[in-house]
Amino acid sequence: MWVSMFIKTATVLSLLVLSNVLMTFAWYWHIKPGNAMMPLWKIVLISWCIALFEYCLAVPANHYGASWGIRPFQLKIMQEVITLTVFALFAVFYLKEGFKLNYLISFGFILAAVYFAFKKWWFKHNNTAWNRLNGENMAGYRDLFIVSSALVTSYGLLPTSDRVQ
């Protein structure tokens, strides 16, 4: 049983990774110095041709994922993590952009979002779950949010113009 779900999840992840490689390339290939010398209509046409193949991978990934029990929010969060990972690699190796500590920390927070999206909560099977979420039950999460927000703003992890004064 778990082998079957592992194979299904690996299939969805593989399709999402391949589709994101194509889409990242379709969106950003032309901003590398020297590639933007052609007319914009050619850049758009080339990008659309690449994006067609991306859709041939992304649509089945989402279709199979949903039919195999992966929730839509889970699919979207998986896709976003894959997109950012693929883009980071693309930016560093193809565009020759630098990778900074604040980008790494941002990715850490996004990975935390994946954890929470797939976490089985104690109130999963309770129909009145939202009624039970009072301040006492959520105090730990509120405190975590406050502490992480303070760290991000006070340790310079945001650009200067975005910091809370």
Image: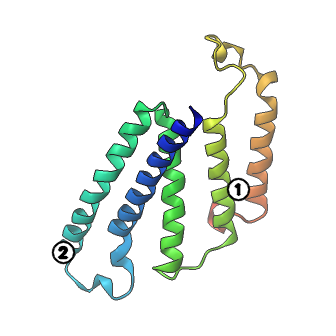
Spot occupied by residue 24 in the image (x, y as percentages of width and height) = 40, 65
> Between residues 93 and 147, which one lies in front from this camera angle?
93
Q: Amino acid at mark 2?
A: Lys
Q: Residue at x 80, y 47 (%)?
A: 147
Instruction: Name the quadrant containing residue 34.
Output: bottom left
Amino acid type assigned to the residue bearing label 1 in the image:
Val
The residue to which callout 2 is attached is: 42
Q: CA distance from mark 1 to mark 2?
A: 43 Å
Front residue of 80/65: it is 65
To which residue does mark 1 refer?
164
User: What kind of element bears circle 2?
Assistant: helix
Nearer-the-camera pick, 152 or 18: 18
Can you give x and y, in whole percent of width and height, for residue 78 in the image?
52, 47
- Corner quadrant of residue 159: bottom right
Q: Quadrant of the N terminus?
A: top right
Q: Residue at x 73, y 58 (%)?
A: 153
